[in-house]
Amino acid sequence: MKYFTLFVATTLLFTSCVSSKKYSDLQSKLEQYESSGAIAETTDKDQKMQIHGAQAQIQEMELEIRSLIEKMSEIESQQEAIQFSDMNPEQLAMAERKMMEDRHNREMNMHEQESNQEFDQMMNVNARQLQSLKTTLTGALSYYAEPQVSILDKGSRIMVLVSDKLLFNEDKSRLTAQGETFMNRLYSALKEQDDRPFKIYGMTGATQDDDLDLASAKAMMVAKNLNAKGGLKQMVAAGAQACNMSGSGRNSACDRVEFIFEYNFDQIIETTKFNGGR
C-alpha cells in the first residue's frame, strides 16, 4: 500500500511539472507579442483575441495545477496516517503539529506564487495595451511633426506633448479650428481604450510670473472637449508648474499641454488583491 501511494504521488508531481511547463510556455508566448513588435503588425481585434485566448489557457493551467496540488495533499495525508499508526501519543502530537506547519507553509508559498503570477500577468497585459495605444496614437497623429506634437515612450508611461500654438488662439481663451481637428484625431485613438485612465496637464513657460490659473484653464478646456465627445471614462486635468524653472527668461517650448498615459496600477492592485482573497 505504501509503495502504490508513493507511485501515485510521483505521477501527479510529474503531471504538475508538465502543466507548469505549459504555463511557462504560454507566458513566454505572451511576452513575445511585445518584444517582437507583433502588436504593430496585427489588427487590434486579432491581437485581443490572441491575448484573451492565451490568458484563458493560463487560467486553465492554474486551475489544473491547483487541483493536482490538492490531490497530492490528500495522498500525503494518507501516507501520514500510515506513518502515525506506529507512534505513541506524544510522538503523534508532535508529528501532527509538524504536519500542520508544513501544510500551512506550503499553502502560503502556493498563494504567494499565484499572486506573483497574477501580478506579472496584469503588468504584461498593461504593457501590451500601452504599446498598442502608442501605435494607435502614432497613426492617428502622424499628420503632425515636432515641435507641434511629440510622442515619447517612457516604458510604463506614454507622453503626448502638444504645442499651445497648435491648440489655442493667441490669448488661449478657446481652441482654434486646427486645435479642434487635433482633438478629433486624438479622440479617435483614445476611444480604442476608453477605460484607460490618463492625465492632462496644462504647462506654462519658464518664468515665475506665469499664471498657473491659465495652465489649469488650458487643461480644463481640453478635458471638456474630450468629455463632450463622450465615452472616455477616466481623466484628470490639472495646471502644472513651469516645465523648466532653471533657465532664464521665457521658454516657449513649455507652453504646451501634456497627455500622460500609464499602466493602470489601481486595476492591477485591485485585481491581484481580489484574486488573492479567493
Image: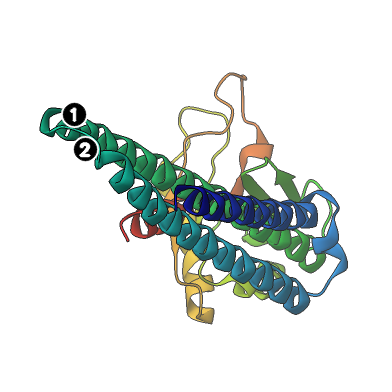
Residue under label 2: 96
The CA distance from mark 1 to mark 2 is 9 Å
Q: As rendered, which of 124 and 56 lies closer to the eye?
A: 56
Residue under label 1: 91
Q: Residue 27: horizontal and vertical position, in percent?
A: 68, 54
Please identify the residue farthest to the left as the structure is shown: 89
Q: Secondary structure at mark 1?
A: helix
Q: Secondary structure at mark 2?
A: helix
In the rendered image, the quadrant that contains the C terminus is bottom left
User: Is 172 situated left or right of 104 in this image?
Assistant: right
User: Is 108 situated left or right of 196 in this image?
Assistant: left
Viewer can see residue 112: yes
* Comparing labels 1 and 2, the label whose residue is closer to the camera: 1
- Residue ID at (63%, 68%): 57
Viewer can see residue 201: no
- Residue ID at (59%, 27%): 244
Q: Quadrant of residue 110?
A: top left
Q: Residue 10: horizontal and vertical position, in percent?
A: 57, 49
Total marks drawn?
2
Q: As rendered, which of 202 and 59 lies closer to the eye?
A: 59
From the viewer's perspective, is residue 140 above or below residue 21?
A: below
* Mark 2 residue type: Glu
Q: Quadrant of residue 48?
A: bottom right
* Mark 1 residue type: Gln
Q: As rendered, which of 173 and 231 lies closer to the eye?
A: 231
- Residue ID at (81%, 66%): 139
* Circles 1, 2 touching at the beta carbon (< 8 Å): no
